[in-house]
Amino acid sequence: MTAARKMRPMHEMYSQDEIERATACVIRAYKDGPQDEYENAAANWADFVVGLGCSEACLKPAIRAVLARRWHAVNGPQDADLQPLPLGCREMEDAKYQSEAGRMLAWYSRSLAHNYYDIQQHPSFYEYACGILADEKVGSQLLEELRDRFPPRLLPGLDECTGNWDPPPTEQEDGGPR
């Protein structure tokens, strides 16, 4: 049994100015609607329907996603095929069909979303990619194309079925010594 993931407060990861800018971006996206879904990261992430209104419960995840995309733009890999961080189902699906690197990026984004976009706790893209490749079968296209960029290395907490990463349980959580 895995322990429940805890959502780190945004102010522990980002400055107040960054949070305010991302909040304004998301509110503008919800207000204006997704005229161009592929340029509207917040709207695309939420896959919302205009006119239904939106509570804080759906704004906060979109704000976290936008903050993570901005963080990835600066701190993630700078290779053109690994930017920007795809948000939402549509962008992730599009990324998967771009290249093997795009497929890896989409999985990374999904894993980040699974962890509430906690960029401090989640492994870096590099660590994540190396972990994914450690589970690939010899001869897979993903492994053949990316192993030179991301040498396979086990990543504790990586679910080989879903590609989502969860923090490995501590000894206290798994019933070990206290």
Image (tube, rainbow, N blue to C red):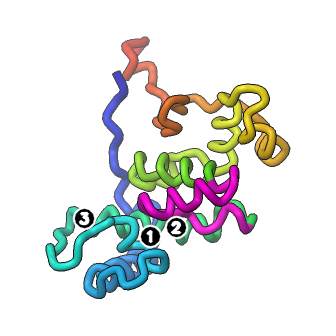
Can you tell which mark lies on residue 174? Answer: none
Q: Residues within 10 Å of mark 2 (few under 14, many from 20)?
A: many
Camera-side residue: 147 or 63?
147
Q: Quadrant of residue 81?
A: bottom right
Query: Which residue carries the number 1 mark?
Result: 66
Residue at 44%, 70% (x, y): give it.
66
Three-letter code, disc 1: Val
Residue at the image position 42 percent from the left and 58 percent from the top: 89
The tag on residue 58 is: 3
**Label 3: element kind:** helix
Q: Is residue 83 left or right of residue 170?
A: right
Q: Quadrant of residue 172?
A: top left
Q: Using the numbered discs, state the Cα–Cα distance from disc 3 to disc 2 in whole angstroms.
A: 17 Å
- Mark sitting on residue 69: 2
Q: Residue placed at 81% from the left, 48% from the top?
A: 149
Label 3 packing within 10 angstroms: few (<14), some (14-19), many (20+): few
Left of 57 or right of it: where is 120? right
Work out which quarter of the rendered image holds the N terminus and state it: top left
Please give the range of residues in magenta: 80-102
Pick the front one: 65 or 98: 98
Q: Dots 2 and 1: beta carbons under 8 Å?
A: yes
Q: Circle 1 — which element?
A: helix
Q: CA distance from mark 1 to mark 3?
A: 13 Å
The stretch drawn in magenta includes residue 37? no
**Image coords of residue 132 (percent x, y):** 64, 37
Residue 61 pos. (x, y %): 33, 62
Q: Main secondary structure of the magenta part?
A: helix
Residue at the image point whose x is 37% and y is 13% from the top: 175
Q: Is residue 98 magenta?
A: yes
